[in-house]
Amino acid sequence: FGYTPRWIIFSIDVFLLIVANLLTYSLLKSLTANFYDVLSPLERYSLVTIINIFCFYVFKTYSGIIRHSSIADAIKLFLSTFTSLIIIVTINIISLLTVGQKIFLFPGLILNAILIFTFLFLFRILIKFVFEKIAESIQSKDTIQTVIMGTDANAIAIANSLQAEKPARFKPYRDW
């Protein structure tokens, strides 16, 4: 399997961001009719998109190999989403102090941040899961039958590490 270029991952992240924005807008629209009218919905969510894209760039959420996503990637996604939320809340407060009216509904900002993080995180988990299943099906034919001699702690540790290896190269023989 080759590597996916960063710009493709970045484009998918932006697509998921736009989907989260549309979902947030439709949920808020169905729950309330009281939007602030300082900016139009297109301007509001364009601002959210631009700020999130900036945070993606700062935290490099698109870098790395998606199929090897780890807790570090989840932390980067969380920091990016949380930072963009803080920036947007700050803009909202500045708008309240200067214009006298907020731009965003605060619950909508929280909902949007949760949706963005969830979509981005689930995308990475899904890719990792699919890759492991494909690699597992390809590698299951090429695994080497292995016999581990002994019952001490070292033999058990070796057996556990061989079973946990992804993709598996060795298959411990079990016939006892």
Image (cartoon, helix red, strand yellow):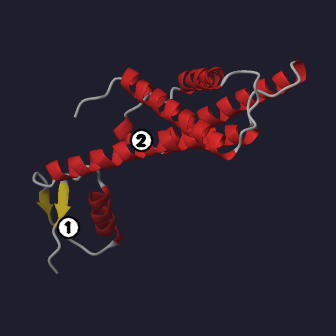
Q: Does residue 78 appear in the picture of this structure?
A: no
Q: Mark 1 to mark 2: distance in Å?
A: 35 Å
Q: Residue 84 carries which label?
A: none
Q: Where is residue 81 in the image (x, y as percent from the top left)?
A: 61, 35
Q: Position of residue 167 (x, y in %)?
A: 25, 49
In the picture, measured across the screen, residue 35 lies left or right of residue 4, that is right
Q: How many marks?
A: 2
Please identify the residue farthest to the bottom as the structure is shown: 176
At x 56%, y 42%, the residue is 115
User: Residue 148 got which mark?
Assistant: 1
Residue type of the residue flagged with mark 1 = Ile
Asked which secondary structure carries label 2, the reply is helix
Residue 132 horizontal/vertical position (percent): 28, 49
- Seen at 71% across and 21% down, the residue is 39
128 to the left or right of 91: left
Using the image, determine if residue 159 lies above or below residue 125. Answer: below
Quarter of the image for the N terminus: give it: top left
Please give the residue where the numbered disc 2 appears in the rendered image: 124
Residue 116 visible in this rendered orientation of the protein: yes
Q: Quadrant of residue 149?
A: bottom left
Q: Where is residue 8 in the image (x, y as percent from the top left)?
A: 37, 24
Kindly identify the residue that appears in the image at 32 percent across and 64 percent down: 160
Give, as a three-letter code, the residue at label 2.
Arg
Assign a secondary structure to mark 1: loop
Locate the C terminus by quadrant: bottom left
